Amino acid sequence: MRKHFAALATFVALCAVSPAFAAPPVGDAASPLPPLAFTDRTLPNGLRVLASENHQTPTVAIYVFYKVGSKDDPPGRSGFAHLFEHLMFKSTKNMASEQLDRLTEDVGGANNAYTADDVTVYHETVPSNHLERLLWAEAERMSNLTVDEKNFKSERAVVQEEFRQSYAANPYGDLYLQTTIQGFTKHPYKRPGIGNLAELQAATVTDVKAFHKTYYRPDNAVLVVVGDFDPAQLKMWADRYFGAVAKPRGAIPRVTAVEPPRTAQRHVAVTAPDVPLPAFSATYLTPGVADADTPALDVLASVLGEGESSRLYRALVYDKQIASEVSVESNGNTEAGLFTVLVTAASGEKLPDLETAAFAEMDKLREEEITAKELEKAKVSLVGGIVRARETVDGTANFLGVAAVLLGDPSRINTELARVNAVTAADVLRVAKKYLSPMNRVIVSYTAKTATVPVAKPDVKKVKP
């Protein structure tokens, strides 16, 4: 995002951590989401256009998904995809710097962007009578971006300050960074999307121009329009503005690295100054987000760490009182994902004891099925997130684009709720056994530099497969 860096959680992961609300009863056939009708066409230059009409309000959402993210950062330029996201709001051949804000905010609309490992997304929501000018503006910055040295240095400084605030000044910043870095060995998913200060400083305007030319092209993008529009007009405008953008010659570079399976547990000790309380993370390698196991993994994450009634929170914070904070999430990218557990110790507690207790609690989910009540609670939360994503034109446009680009099929927007509802307690047990194995675990322990904390011998007791 332009103002606050955040990695994109796919809509499935987003649902898993969204606050609960009064969602329809799970499996209630009387209140399913109606199927979303949409059109899907590809222009001669390769741009894919997805569109869905919604005339409930006179607004329209425009999303442009570029199939380039942090995993595509050039060598020695980590954080570049995110830096480039900022630069896309600067000048073009026919737009002054920040003019996109005037085209949206001055008419009561909004604009923003986000960078994830696999995609960079730019979006606007405006009154529907302003659709044409926003389509023109998006096509303009796709084809005619101009960045001078002054704007480049200004935005680079903004991103560097984001790094300082979110990570360098955060007492747990190094833990968050190392959790990602240690989570992968071969795949560039291991590079945090925010990058690092030295490599950001080394970036140049020449790098910017090369990156734009390489990835910001119509055959590497998906345009999504949802809301109050006339289909014939949209077709005409998309053809007029985007159809005029030339398709460059040459193939688009793609990441070819494959993350190998984990075969042994790793334990990495990280220290940093001024750590208030010891903490640790544990990651487990999981498949890409489109995989059939994703809904069950999301349910598992919810049961383990969502809310004060979750397994880990109840066991570590309430019962044993050895932890002060717990979080669990299952985040999937297109090629691989991480199931991540973060636990902060209570005051005076030893990290090795906390790790042992946490893993013992997690092992229970590999030995017996969750309860019907736990399954229902997790599904209600997940279903609620899916329903909320469809409540607005903005959320629907993002959902449709994510389905097309990350899940590989835009029609998945109409099947995700059924996939969640189909998860059984047996499915959760199966994925817990499959993925939460100690041999699939990387632990990052995090303590203050001045503290001497022993690293416990990992508990790798065998669990029946």
Image (tube, rainbow, N blue to C red):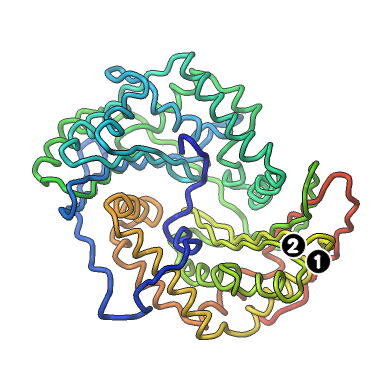
Of residues 183 and 46, which is closer to you in this image? 183
Of residues 440 and 383, which is closer to you in this image? 383
Task: Tell which residue pokes out farthest to the left in this image.
Answer: 232
Marks 2 & 1, CB-CB < 8 Å contact = yes
In space, the residues marked 2 and 1 are separated at their CA atoms by: 8 Å
Task: Using a 10 Å C-alpha cutoff, classify the residue at mark 1 as few (fewer than 14 neighbours), some (14 to 19) or many (20 or more).
Answer: some
Q: Position of residue 35 (x, y in %)?
A: 23, 66
Label drawn at residue 458: 1
Residue 124 vs 11, above or below: the answer is above
Q: Amino acid at mark 2?
A: Gln
At a point 72% along the width and 71% down the height, the residue shown is: 316
Q: Which residue is mark 2?
A: 265
Q: Earlier in the sequence, mark 2 or mark 1?
A: 2
Q: Is residue 20 left or right of residue 51?
A: right
At a point 61% along the width and 40% down the height, the residue shown is: 166
Q: Amino acid at mark 1?
A: Pro
